[in-house]
Image (cartoon, helix red, strand yellow):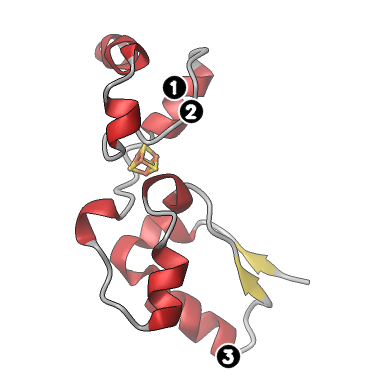
Amino acid sequence: MIIGSGYSYLQEWLPNVAQHVLRNGMADSVGFGRMVLSYPTMPADMIAGRSLTRNLICRTFSDCTTAPRNGLVSGCYPLDPLYKKLPEAEQLKAIKETL
Ligand code: SF4
């Protein structure tokens, strides 16, 4: 079983590339990683043939990985209102200014 990874970096092109890969037998499945943090309903939108919601598409800012590398909870701080409001958002901002 081959599961493709790294597709979040393709942003709005994720569905098109995933479709091509699966149709041509280049992988058995396409895994969703960080995209599910910012846009958990993307697969449902794809399957239903709906247009993507642009402001939910992961833009690979990597706050979801920078935060846990610095002892903070992971989440999509730039795009998810829940994480934007957390005190950890300010902590993360301060950490990033030192990098
Ligand atoms: S924090 Fe950045 S990389 Fe992580 S899910 Fe949100 S937009 Fe994507």
Residue at disc 3, secondary structure: loop
At horizontal 30% and vertical 66% (from top left) the residue drawn is: 12
Q: Is residue 59 left or right of residue 76?
A: left
- Residues 77 and 25: in front is 77
Q: Position of residue 18 (x, y in %)?
A: 49, 76
Which mark, by number, is residue 10?
A: none
Image quarter of residue 61: top left
What numbered label is drawn on residue 74? 2
Direction left: furthest residue: 55
Q: Are marks 1 and 2 in contact (CB under 8 Å)?
A: yes
- The residue where tag 3 is placed is 24
In which quadrant will I find the C terminus?
A: top left
Q: For the view shown, which residue lies furthest in the bottom direction? A: 24
Residues marked 2 and 3 touching at CB (< 8 Å): no
The vertical placement of 28 against 39, above or below, is: below
Taking the image as shown, residue 23 lies to the left or right of residue 50, namely: right
CA–CA distance in space, label 3 to label 1? 37 Å
User: What amino acid type is highlighted by mark number 3?
Assistant: Asn
Residue 70 at x, y percent in the picture: 48, 14
Return the disc, 2 or 3, that comes first in the chain's sequence. 3
Measured as percent of width and height from the top left, residue 16 is found at 39, 79
From what the image shows, is residue 84 above or below residue 45?
Answer: above
- Residue 3 appears left or right of 81: right
At 47% from the left and 51% from the top, the residue drawn is 36
Assign a secondary structure to mark 2: loop
In front: label 2 or label 3: 2
Mark identifier at residue 67 = 1
